[in-house]
Structures are given as structure tokens and as C-alpha cells.
Amino acid sequence: MTSEQLRMVLATRNRDKVLEIRAGLTDFAVEILSLEAFPQAPEVIEDGETLEANAAKKAVMIHEYTGLPALADDSGLFVAALHGAPGVYSNRYAGEQATYQDNVKKLLWEMRAVPAAARAAEFVSVMAFAHNGQVHLLRGVCPGSIAPAPRGEGQFGYDPVFIVAGRSRSFAEMTLAEKNIVSHRGLVLVEFKKLFLQLGLVKQEEKN
């Protein structure tokens, strides 16, 4: 593989994550495939007790199946007043088949009596990159707080109720470009771009 263009697959079927990751890597010569290009790819069971375990498992399994470098993300919302919940179970907080709205509804119900001063939380993203028999793990953290009610129509997951520290808007009230500057996933992508450059896998595209 040359440094002209990195061809890799994202180890997720979540179209919202694919959109964010692609947007975060637009300034690099990277061809990004989603699992839609591999309809027979195995379904990875996220049974790890940590974000790191889940991300690494997804990256390795998809790398082995496709033969391509694979990038996987596992993210979680950690709420102080709920002793770190929903954490690693964020995607299925309200049940295995829960929708984004189901999870937000449960979170707000669990926090119904929590005062504004005690609603601190942080979004954490761990990404794993499997390539040439190695797995690189990087972590991004975005501190903030939980709003008392959903705000905004954009983005996905818990974004309507997560307010970034030092800002007045929820993730859902931001554009994707604005969110990627400050979000947990955006921050870890910045570190991965540095890693890709160090490994000689990519080159940064010049802007006219």
C-alpha cells in the first residue's frame, strides 16, 4: 500500500457514524468503504466490558473478513449522577432493539430529579484501527452536561440532550462540521489522522 490513498472499511452498519467519520477525514486521500459494500460480513457481537474491547473486536473481525485496513468506533455516554451509566451500554440502554429516542427518553427519566449543577457527563469515543496484524487504539473525550429536555433536530443518538462544556448548544443544534470540531469522535479522528501520516498510509490533500 502506498501513501497515495488509503483504502479502508469502517466496521459499522450505523450510517450516522459513517457520515461523521467520512466528514472528519475529508482532508485526506482516503477511500472509505462502509459495510454496505460487504453484505455478507459477520455481525460483530459487542460483548466487551469496555469501549476498547468492543472497538478492537470489531476492527479485527472486519479486517480479517475483508482483508482491508479496518477502522471501528465504540462510543459511550458516561453520566456522573448515574455512576457512569449508560456507558458501554449506551446504544442499548433502553433495550437491545432500542431506538435513539427510546434511549434518550430513559436517560431523561433516570435524571428527572437531578439538579442542573449535578448533570455533568462526558462522551467518550474509542477507535481501533486494524492493519497489518496490528491494532491501534485511540480515545477521544468530550466533557459536557445533560439538558433537561431534547434540543435540536440534527445528528443522532444522545446528541439532542448533550451540551458541550463551555457551549450553550446541544450537539443536535450544531452542524456536522461544528460538531466534528469539538466532539469525542471528531477529536479522536484528529489523532488518527496524525497516526496515518506517521505510518505513511496517507497524504494530506492540498486545498486550493
Image (cartoon, rainbow, N blue to C red):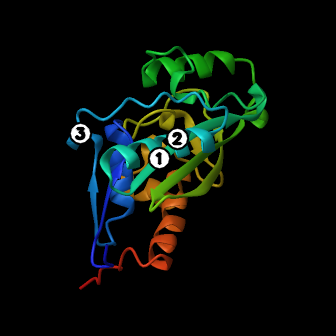
Q: Between marks 1 and 3, how big is the CA–CA gap?
A: 18 Å
Q: Is residue 186 left or right of residue 18?
A: right
Seen at 34% across and 43% down, the residue is 65
Q: Earlier in the sequence, mark 1 or mark 3?
A: 3
Q: Which residue is drawn at 43% across and 52% down?
A: 71
Residue drawn at point x = 60 percent, y = 33 percent: 147
Residue assigned mark 1: 60
Q: Is residue 170 visible?
A: no
Question: As rendered, which of 22 and 112 lies closer to the eye?
Answer: 22
- The residue indicated by pointer 3 is 36
Q: Residue type at mark 2? A: Lys
> Dividing the image into 4 quarters, which one contains the C terminus?
bottom left
Amino acid marked by disc 3: Glu
What kind of element bears circle 3?
A: helix
Which image quadrant is residue 111 in? top right
In the rendered structure, which disc, 2 or 3, sits on the residue that comes first in sequence? Answer: 3
Depth check, mark 2 against mark 3: the one in front is 2
Image position of 45 (left or right of 109): left
Question: What secondary structure is found at the residue carrying circle 2?
Answer: helix
Q: Where is residue 16 in the image (x, y as percent from the top left)?
A: 35, 40
Would you call the spot at circle 1 few (<14 residues within 10 Å), some (14-19), or many (20 or more)?
many
**Does the CB distance between marks 2 and 1 fall below 8 Å?**
yes
Instruction: Give the number of the disc on residue 71.
Output: none
Residue that badge 2 annotates: 57
Foreground pick, 176 / 115? 176
The residue lying at 42 percent from left, 79 percent from top is 200
In the picture provided, is 89 more to the left or to the right than 42?
right
